[in-house]
């Protein structure tokens, strides 16, 4: 039996967006700077794929770190397709949303881990789009789900450690994508 949730569908949509973006970049684009301090597009994609791999391994009961080395190699699209398939399968297996998961940065209910996974793919997809001059959007369902989590979390510690930038003021009536990006220190 496969579990299907809005969060898993949002993760799939975030991967759809990231796949489209990555299919439009060339090897030279990997050296372009991003809005993530110290990361070019290659480093950002390695982080994103490393995080996806971490979630996949943790769901399989293994301890894992976010840094998995150079996963991008010379074929970012193939690397993304491989990480995507494994990551989505890990969340769709029976019991994937049961219990807690321990990540390098803390222990959370599996469902919270899933939302953080959605965030990594969706928001870093937006970062890739901005860095490579493509249309930068976050899937509306992914933005809604991720914004719901981060609005509840104390963010000061994460900001102090450089995980997120200072919050950018965004009107309450702004689209949820813009409010999410503002919470995470990004400007739409």
Image: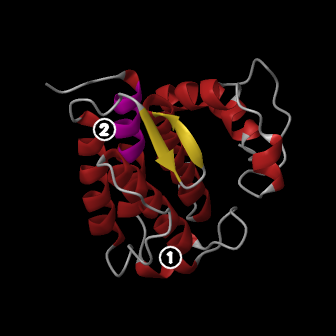
Which residue is at a point 43% across and 60% down the rendered structure image?
A: 64
x and y, in percent, of residue 185 in the image: 77, 46
Start and end of the magenta stretch? 7-15
x and y, in percent, of residue 76 in the image: 36, 70
Which residue is at a point 36% across and 80% down the rendered structure image?
A: 73
Identify the image's colour scheme: rainbow, by chain, secondary structure or one colour: secondary structure
**Mark number for residue 13?**
none
Asked which secondary structure carries label 2, the reply is helix
Whole-number angstrom distance, CA of label 1 to CA of label 2: 29 Å
Q: Is residue 80 above or below residue 164?
A: below
| Quadrant position of the C terminus in the picture | top right
The quadrant in which residue 128 appears is: bottom right
Q: Is residue 43 above or below residue 150?
A: below
The residue identified by callout 1 is 30
Q: From the viewer's perspective, is 125 left or right of 1? A: right
Which residue is at a point 34% across and 51% down the rendered structure image?
A: 56
Q: From the viewer's perspective, is 105 left or right of 52? A: right
**Mark number for residue 91?**
2
* Label 1 with label 2: CB-CB less than 8 Å: no
| Quadrant position of the N terminus in the picture | top left
x and y, in percent, of residue 27 in the image: 42, 80
Asked which secondary structure carries label 1, the reply is helix
Q: Is residue 103 visible?
A: yes
x and y, in percent, of residue 65 in the image: 48, 63
Residue 59 in magenta stretch? no
The quadrant in which residue 35 appears is: bottom right
Mark 1 crowdedness (10 Å alpha carbons): few <14, some 14-19, many ≥20: many
Q: Residue furthest top?
A: 173
């Amino acid at each position: 039996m496969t579990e299907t949730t809005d969060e898993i569908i949002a993760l799939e949509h975030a991967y759809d967006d990231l796949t489209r973006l990555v299919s439009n970049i060339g090897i030279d684009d990997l050296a372009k700077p991003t809005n993530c301090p110290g990361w070019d597009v290659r480093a950002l994609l390695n982080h994103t794929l490393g995080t996806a791999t971490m979630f996949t391994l943790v769901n399989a009961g293994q301890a894992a770190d976010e840094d998995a080395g150079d996963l991008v190699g010379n074929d970012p699209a193939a690397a993304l397709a491989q990480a995507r398939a494994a990551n989505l399968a890990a969340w769709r297996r029976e019991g994937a949303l049961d219990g807690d998961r321990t990540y390098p940065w803390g222990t959370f209910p599996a469902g919270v881990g899933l939302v953080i996974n959605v965030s990594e793919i969706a928001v870093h997809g937006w970062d890739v789009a901005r860095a490579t001059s493509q249309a930068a959007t976050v899937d509306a369902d992914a933005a809604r789900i991720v914004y719901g989590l981060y609005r509840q979390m104390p963010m000061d510690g994460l900001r102090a450690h450089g995980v997120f930038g200072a919050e950018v003021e965004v009107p309450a009536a702004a689209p949820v994508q813009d409010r999410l990006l503002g919470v995470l220190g990004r400007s739409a």
